[in-house]
Amino acid sequence: MSGRKETVLDLAKFVDKGVQVKLTGGRQVTGTLKGYDQLLNLVLDEAVESVRDHDDPLKTTDQTRRLGLIVCRGTAVMLVSPTDGTEEIANPFGQPEAV
């Protein structure tokens, strides 16, 4: 065995592109991926955080907060997705509303 640990994600294709990162605790940040390491620590430039709803912390509001250049610790990263080519769709498993 080589003592080298490979990451599951290949983040090289996302460098200098927009990504959306979900962190433990419910925070959600969007920015340009500038760098990363094998522990999944991420460096994001021009980062913008989606502010969560005060009454329901699981929901985000339309308000944002500019953060600038940030480092996201790999232990807190839950999801990394590209911003290009993604869009929000309606839940196909949701209950239809009564008319």
Image (spheres, grey):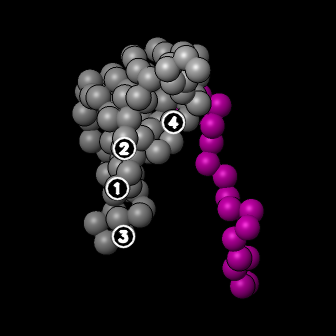
Q: Are marks 2 and 4 in contact (CB under 8 Å)?
A: no
**Residue drawn 32% across the image and 35% down it:** 73
The type of residue carrying mark 4 is: Val
Q: Identify residue for label 4.
A: 80
The type of residue carrying mark 2 is: Ala
Q: CA distance from mark 2 to mark 4?
A: 11 Å
Mark toward the start of the polypeptide (4 vs 3): 3
* Label at residue 56: 3
Which numbered mark, 2 or 4, is in the foreground of this view?
Answer: 2
Which quadrant of the figure has residue 22? Answer: top left
At numbered mark 4, what does the secondary structure look like: helix, strand or loop?
strand
Residue 18, image x, y percentages: 48, 25
Which residue range is magenta in the image? Answer: 83-99
Residue, far front: 1
Residue 46, image x, y percentages: 32, 25
Which numbered mark, 3 or 1, is in the foreground of this view?
Answer: 1
